[in-house]
Amino acid sequence: MSMWKNVVPAAEQQRQSKREALLHEAAAAFNKQGFHGTSLNDIAKKLGVTKAALYTYVPSKEDLLYFCHDWAMDGAFESLEHARGAGGTGLEKLRNTLQHYLEQMLMEGGAFVVLLEENALKPAHAKAIIKRRDEFEVALRSFVTEGIADGSIVPCNEKIAVFLALGALNWVRKWYSPEGAWSAQLIAESLTQMIERGLATAQSTHLMPQSDGTPASI
């Protein structure tokens, strides 16, 4: 019996649970090895199933990459809604969105594929992902604009500020190790603190240090 990496859901959730297990494993492989360095055989082996079993859920490796990108964007928009619900200044909404998004990206065990391989997508898939990504970026820029208006963010170019923040966040998936000394939550809080400090009108006097003050792998 195929175990799908020991995922044993209730009958009505079986297909969705297996699909999520597939997306987790595929995204982790794409993040580590790149799209062209990853095969469906690699992913199937990690899941403990045959390559043929994967075709029940995805017609091709390119479609699998698209689904991973789309799932990442679902997380991005969920983070936006989380921040909007919490309210606050434009800076607070921006920080909360970025921190929640990065926590999801890291805590999902690599479930969110780094948004750097859209060139490997079919034109229609790339267009759909770029559209969603642009909508997310526009929403983030609106928080920067709001922060400038309410005095929580220094006057700056909103587009450059968002590009800087997302560039920093999206690259974390390339170097973060769950086995390191820092948790996903700690990495997300520390990184967003640094981004916040670069934009805030009210500067904090310190940033989060390591818990014991000694060098450690992250």
Image (cartoon, grey):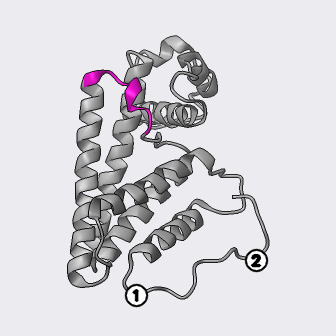
- Residue stretch rendered in magenta on the structure: 116-123
Which mark's residue is nearer the viewer, 2 or 1? Answer: 1
Residue at image position (47%, 49%) is 170
Q: How far apart are marks 2 and 1 (CA)?
A: 26 Å
Q: Mark 2 points at which residue?
A: 213
21 to the left or right of 162? right
* Of the pair 111 and 146, the residue shown nearer to us: 146
Secondary structure of the residue carrying tag 1 is loop
Residue 167 visible, this angle: yes
Element type at mark 2: loop
Of all residues, the one furthest to the top in this rendering is 52
* Label 1 Cα neighbours within 10 Å, binned few <14 / some 14-19 / many ≥20: few
Amino acid type, callout 2: Gly
On screen, residue 41 versus residue 161, left or right, reads right
Q: Residue at x 54, y 88 (%)?
A: 205
**Image point (57%, 32%), residue name:** 29
Q: Earlier in the sequence, mark 2 or mark 1?
A: 1
Can you say whether 154 is above or below 116 in the image?
below
Q: Relative to residue 178, is residue 51 drawn left or right? A: left
Asked if labels 1 and 2 touch by Cβ distance under 8 angstroms, the answer is no
Q: Residues within 10 Å of mark 2 (few under 14, many from 20)?
A: few
Check residue 202 in the rendering and tell me which mark sits there, or answer none. Answer: 1
Q: Percent x, y for residue 215?
A: 78, 67
**Residue 99 position within the rendered picture, expressed as x and y whole percent measured from the top left:** 44, 64
Quarter of the figure with residue 124: top left
Residue 23, horizontal then vertical, whole percent: 46, 34
Closest to the observer, 17 or 69: 69
Splitting the image into 4 quarters, where does residue 11 fall? top left
Residue 155 in the image: x percent, y percent? 28, 76
Quadrant for the N terminus in the image: top right
Q: What residue type is labelled 1?
A: Ala
